[in-house]
Amino acid sequence: MNAQTPAHAADQISEILRRNEQAMMAAIFKVCDDAARTTDDELRLAGIDPISMRDGYFASVALHLLFLNQCGADMETSEGGDPKRAAHLLRAGRRISACHWGGIDAEQRTRRSDIALDDDERRELADSAQRAASKRVMRALVDHASTADPDLCNRVTADIETYIKRLSPQSETDRYFAERLQESVAVLLQPPGD
């Protein structure tokens, strides 16, 4: 383990992920633009007037294929895959639309059908609400206890590292669990305002 504090490591992880996500999206947009240019060029070489493709055609194709991939469907036939995963992804998109753009159309805004919940989603939201409440309560308790015991955060971090060493993470799943555990503790121990 390195000498960084877990909170600093979590900040670095967030920054690295953000930077690489931006680079990934720039690459996707470039590939889509290149595909549009190449298609126009190939059509011209074949003696065909380039067809007028709507803006974002290749980005839509990429989104469609990524959706199929995330659902485990066949990317050639669009068949198969996990319908529950597909429904979850579609609900997430509808929630984004409802939250940031007021829904897809006036009828859906009125009925709020764009954010209707099924039982699985209700459980997910309930679990998420419970985690958020637990995090805030733990944050308040850590803040209060740290006033009386300034070394508390260091001891908790050391205890977590000892726990992880006892697990001796071997598999990818073990390592993923250990990393999430470290990140979660770092967030809970992070001083207010950081």
Image (tube, rainbow, N blue to C red):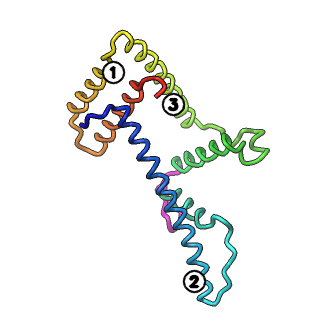
Q: Find numbered disc 1 in the image and state the secondary structure of the residue it sits on.
A: helix
Which residue shows up at 52% across the image and 67% down it? Answer: 31
In the drawing, does residue 88 fall left or right of residue 172?
Answer: right
Which residue shows up at 29% across the image and 45% down it? Answer: 172
Q: Secondary structure of the magenta portion, mostly?
A: loop
Mark 1 or 2, nearer chain start:
2
For badge 1, the amino acid type reads Cys
Nearer-the-camera pick, 105 or 111: 105
In the displayed structure, 124 sits above or below 71; it is: above
Which residue shows up at 53% across the image and 27% down it? Answer: 129
Observer-side mark, 3 or 2, equals 2
In the rendered view of the protein, which quadrant contains the N terminus? top left
In the drawing, does residue 73 fall left or right of residue 92?
Answer: left
Q: Is residue 73 magenta?
A: yes
Give the spatial CA distance, label 1 vs label 3. Answer: 25 Å
Which residue shows up at 26% across the image and 44% down it? Answer: 171
For badge 2, the amino acid type reads Glu
Residue 191, percent from left and from top: 42, 23
Residue 34 appears in which quarter of the rendering?
A: bottom right
Give the spatial CA distance, label 1 vs label 2. Answer: 62 Å
The residue beneath circle 3 is 128
Mark 1 or 3, nearer chain start:
3
Q: Find numbered disc 3 in the image and state the secondary structure of the residue it sits on.
A: helix
Nearer-the-camera pick, 73 or 23: 23
- Specify the label residue 114 is tagged with: none
- Specify the label residue 153 is tagged with: 1
The residue beneath circle 2 is 42
Observer-side mark, 1 or 2, equals 1
Residue 100 appears in which quarter of the rendering?
A: top right
For badge 3, the amino acid type reads Ser
